[in-house]
Amino acid sequence: MKILITGGAGFIGSHLSRRLLADGHSIVVLDDLSTGRYENIEDLEDGKRLRLIVDTVNNGALVDACVKECDCVYHLASAVGVRLIIDQPVHTIESIVGGTETVLKSCARYRKPFLLTSTSEVYGKGSKVPFCEDDDRVMGSTGKRRWSYACAKALDEFLALAYWVENRLPVVIARLFNTVGPGQTGQYGMVVPTFVRQALRGEPIRVFGDGQQSRCFAHVEDVVGGLEGLMNTPAARGKVVNIGNNEEVSIDFLAQRVKVLCDSPSPIVHIPYEEAYGEGFDDMRRRVPSLERAAQLIGYKPSCSLDKILSDVIAHERRKMG
């Protein structure tokens, strides 16, 4: 098939591009390189099996032309990372909601299957663990900027599902939980590459808050396999599906494992949220996915443990540092 990946030069998008190329498909990547990096796909771009177009998903005419020539669309283009969301809330909302609307309109026009990557952020401050796809959502105040991302991505989901209900456009939504792996930048607040780089440099490993908040980290190779499986499974259409790992760890434990695996002398220090993100920052204590729906639909089961994930990231960062 010929496949369009918006945001295909980003961390997840570039890994998805590699997987789909390995499976024999050809790829059109549409990316404005605002958070994606050309280096992620430089070795793949040959103008034949992978073609990169540097532009925004808000360019309706271009998006329409790209969708028309492709067989299906993976929509990954989005603002990413807590730091970017806090610093650029207007860009966050406009790029997420406007871009998704533009791509969906073209997919509806040409009846092209559409996969939306959403986020565990849409669960907000929900306390029922594990998070199931049909659970109620609990959002923070509109005065706290971090929730703009969660609400914008939730609106994306509503819009995609509306196209499914009204037009039977084949859509599926993947809610991703903390995807990590080789090549991820820590520029926008991603915790694993940030901790690894701090540990390898012997710098303090900076844990925000008290460190008892917990997360689940999934290897990017498991995640892109899940995305491909969802796109190729008709039974998944019209559904929201969690994709991630359900191995729950505290951020303190994560910092300690990074320190041990890096054999690092770095001290672990705690930084108040107010110092890291400004006054009034909201966070959630636990975020754990139920993976039952993914298992039922596509046989999804994460294969990589936390230590495997961290070892891959550490090896990648060591190579970069020479």
Image (tube, grey):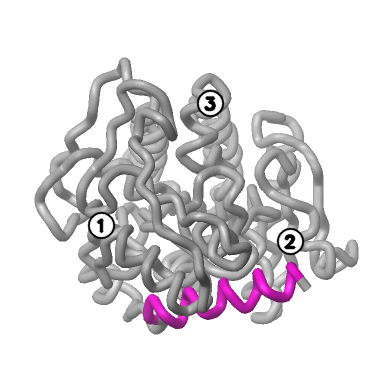
Name the residue located 36 percent from the left edge and 28 percent from the top edge.
274
Tell me if residue 111 comes above or below residue 235 in the rendering: above
Q: Nearer the viewer, mark 2 or mark 1?
A: 1
First to last magenta residue range: 305-321
- The quadrant the N terminus occupies is bottom right
3D distance between C-alphas at marks 3 and 1: 24 Å
Name the residue located 58 percent from the left edge and 63 percent from the top edge.
202
Q: Which mark is residue 87?
A: 3
Magenta residues, dominant SS class = helix
Considering depth in this image, is 51 or 319 the residue closer to the camera?
319
Considering depth in this image, is 309 or 263 the residue closer to the camera?
263
Q: Mark 2 = which residue?
A: 40
Q: Earlier in the sequence, mark 3 or mark 1?
A: 3
Q: Secondary structure at mark 2?
A: helix
Going by the numbered disc 3, the residue's amino acid type is: Asp
3D distance between C-alphas at marks 2 and 1: 29 Å
Q: Earlier in the sequence, mark 3 or mark 2?
A: 2
- The quadrant the C terminus occupies is bottom right
Q: Which mark is residue 214?
A: 1
Q: Nearer the viewer, mark 3 or mark 2?
A: 3
Going by the numbered disc 2, the residue's amino acid type is: Asn
